[in-house]
Image (cartoon, grey):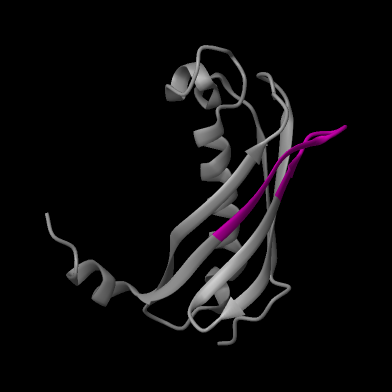
Amino acid sequence: MTIEPGLRAEVLIMVERSDTAIKVGSGDVPVLGTPRLLAVAEAATVRAVRDHLAPGQTSVGTKVTLEHRAASPVGTHVEVVAELVEVDGRRLVFEVTARDRTRTVATATIERVVVDRERFLSGLTG
């Protein structure tokens, strides 16, 4: 399989109480927590390339730059779009945008590296 720039995926969420900064421990306001937003953004990057990896391969996150620009209260729909913009060997670079109906909620650059799943897991120490 080939991984090339232009691959993309969208993830749409509705902010629930379980997504709030209060619930995830990143603040004390009832809005979409940055850690939860990052998790959704990373899920979009995984989805963008999952069907293009060779059998036995996966990708792991290595670097994130995230700007969380606007608050999203409970009940808000947020669409997160990840697009693969650069492939450098095993390194994949994604540009991510999160939007609600009226504005950009966040932007991010997320880097992932393609690895052999079993080799990666065998190298873990616990």
Looking at the image, how many numbered discs can be counted on the residues?
A: 0
Q: Per the image, is 108 magenta?
A: yes
Residue 117 picture location, percent across and down:
32, 72
Q: Using residue 63 as the reference point, say whether residue 11 is left or right of it.
A: right
Residue at the far left in the pictured view: 126
Residue at 44% of width from left, 60% of height from top?
Answer: 62
Residue 13, placed above or below residue 45: above
Residue at 69% of width from left, 76% of height from top?
Answer: 5
From the image, which quarter does the C terminus lie in? bottom left
Q: Per the image, is 79 magenta?
A: no
Residue 87 picture location, percent across and down:
60, 78
Q: Using residue 106 as the reference point, say whether residue 122 is left or right of it.
A: left
Residue 89, placed above or below residue 49: below
Residue at 19% of width from left, 70% of height from top?
Answer: 123
From the image, which quarter does the N terminus lie in? bottom right
Query: Front-most of 18 and 29?
Result: 29
Q: Quadrant of residue 109?
A: bottom right
Q: Magenta segment, which residues?
A: 97-110
Q: Using residue 63 as the reference point, say whether residue 76 is left or right of it.
A: right
